[in-house]
Amino acid sequence: MIRPDAPVLLEIRDLHARVEDKAILKGVNLTIRAGEIHAVMGRNGSGKSTLSKVLAGHPAYTVTGGSVTYRGDNLLELDPEQRARIGVFLGFQYPVEIPGVSNLEFLRVATNARRTEQGHEELDTFAFEDLVRERLKVVQMDPAFLDRSVNEGFSGGEKKRNEILQMALLEPLVAILDETDSGLDIDALRIVAGGVNQLANADNATLLITHYQRLLDAITPDYVHVMAAGRILRTGGKELALELEQRGYDWVDQELAALAAEVA
Amino acid sequence: MSSSQAVGDLVSQPYKYGFVTDIETEKIAKGLSEDVVRLISSKKEEPAFLLEFRLRAYRQWLQMQEPDWAALGYPPIDYQDVVYYAAPKQQQKKASLDEVDPKLLETFDKLGIPLSEQKRLSNVAVDAVFDSVSIATTYKEKLAEHGVIFCSISEAVKDHPELIERYLGTVVPSNDNYFAALNSAVFSDGSFVFIPKGVECPMELSTYFRINSGDTGQFERTLIVAEQGASVSYLEGCTAPMFDTNQLHAAVVELVVLEDASIKYSTVQNWYAGDENGVGGIYNFVTKRGQCRGDRSKISWTQVETGSAITWKYPSCVLQGADSVGEFYSVALTNNKQQADTGTKMIHVGPRTRSTIVSKGISAGRSANSYRGLVQIGPKAVGARNYSQCDSMLIGDQAAANTYPYIRSQQPQASVEHEASTCRISEDQLFYLQSRGIGFEEAVSMMVSGFCRDVFNQLPMEFAAEADKLLALKLEGSVG
């Protein structure tokens, strides 16, 4: 939902970042307002996953220039945990398995960290169980997954559902979903996308990072951005994704070549 | 700060029990000889049989060699440079706690082991041992009502010499090994527990060992006897001040379990581990063994080993009685330059005996952590079963973890299973937890306690949370 007067949640300005010695982001600009759903598309290696990790504060990535403000504050100076607590959420492409740590306990500690930051009371075990059982419905998840270790032995689809469950509990204002559709069959995709749609509202925003149109058939974006060589090359509405689907990414290469020629 | 550095700092938390209590101590001169053994025995006014026991052990020790098979490296120990007896100066054993030197009570308060009537732990009886001498035992009277004897071993020698004579040295003979022989010759104090037939001990029993003096060796001796159908849960805790010299600690623990009886023995060992360069710290050479003498008897060892510069320790079970059960649950954490070689021996003698071994080793810093365990199934142990699981967790990239399982079976109808795994706390796991709002330190401690959960579940409730905290503290700054 595009409302020009809606407050800006995330403002990315000329963002540059590298991993080890390799420059990956080379000047990303993006403004995200409350209520909006954005999709960033692009080939492997275009920098879209790096963008999500930089926003979440992954220690392997170094920001070399530009700025990111979240509701007016400098996001880049915060630790990853602090970013999460104030409402920035990263849904992982490959959710990590953590043997020995109970999923329920993990979800409770995470939820309470967010609640404390918001000035709410921490939930005790019982209150949290009530909450989590209600939120399980968002992704039609079996409560048995709560008693297992975090993501351990989960199938690809179960891991992604667990990600959306975390999102449902943490109620972020900006949710960045990195290739949430990868590895999902049609049914799982529908459930996960349904969860994302249920959670989207006028106060929050979603940034989908994806390869494929099929996720965007289930979640309608307000904006589609095409990323290539560490920059957003073009921005449009949902029809841009359809165009990509039909024409492929070859035109992206042509535009890149033209850009390179201009610079030369 | 890179996360590897951060984990490192996390582990290298200052040792908070490193203070020294300024108290007058009676010490004998350094060195070991037959005269010293006689002197210790006479200071303790011991009966003749005990002096004999000590002298025999001393002569055996002289003939023995220090073991060198463990994966441990340390400079040679000069056994003549150790003080073999030190005791805080106070008049004879106190009738009540009010007469105990307040400095000692204060010391234990500071360690979180309040002894005074008002503050003591509500369902745990404590024997407090300071520099190898028992200074106080709480709830003695209440335990006596149930026929339970819980006192220092010195008192037991005076008050129950027949029990000591019957059981001492019957599980760990004085010539069992080098360190056990040394202990048998010079042991100063320790705890004695006797649970009579059919009695379920009404409270947790606990001994807290505190080393205070700098150059003094520590040689405690603990003996626990559970008669037919009796049961008890016992916990020992250990801390020591920080000195820049290494200190020798060689303890012996013996457990005797008769028919249908059970002993659960838990240890939280947090001796001073030395500094980050490995200077100072306790050399911990301990022999712990229990005998399941009766049918259907059970011994369960649980240990959380976090301290000491060197740990050499293999709490073992001799499963003689038919259907007897031995268990060993261990968490050993090493950091900086600590070295641990620890594990267990499960000796299956009787038919249908069962044993379970769960060992969790965590190595951080530049430490080395080895599991060494023996499962032995004798020819009469028809239908014996063992299950062993040894997991190692590495933190950082300079720590080492080794597993040395030994299996000897002379019984074709026995089943022995061994599983082992090694894992590392990865940056991705930490980042995942952090990206959900969980702070770095909490993330590490969640993962470590998750790793150790099977073992912590075995600890008495009052101490499980403590152990969790202790580990978190030890790990502060170590993950990378």
Image: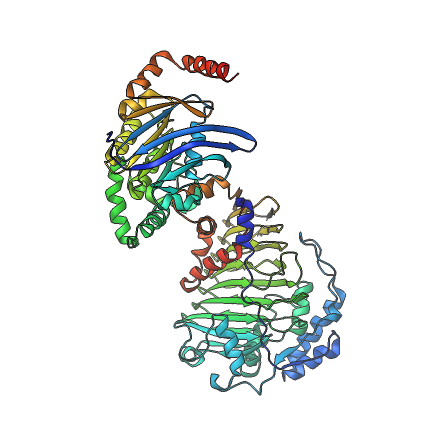
Q: Residue B268 in the image: x percent, y percent?
A: 51, 62
Left or right: A219 in relation to B469: left
Residue at (33%, 52%) from the top-left corner? Answer: A116
The quarter of the picture where residue A192 lies is: top left
For the N terminus of chain A, which image quadrant? top left
Q: Nearer the viewer, residue A42 or B196?
A: A42
Q: Residue B390 in the image: x percent, y percent?
A: 53, 47
Q: Residue A177 in the image: x percent, y percent?
A: 36, 32
Q: Work out whether B192 lies above or below B290.
A: below
Q: Residue A74 in the image: x percent, y percent?
A: 40, 42
Can residue B419 be seen here?
no
Q: Work out whether B241 lies above or below A187.
A: below
User: Disc count in the image?
Assistant: 0
Can residue B245 be seen here?
yes
The quarter of the picture where residue B279 lies is: bottom right
Residue at (40%, 31%) from the top-left corner? Answer: A93
Q: Work out whether B278 lies above or below A50.
A: below
Colouring rule applied to residues: rainbow
Q: Work out whether A143 lies above or below B11.
A: above
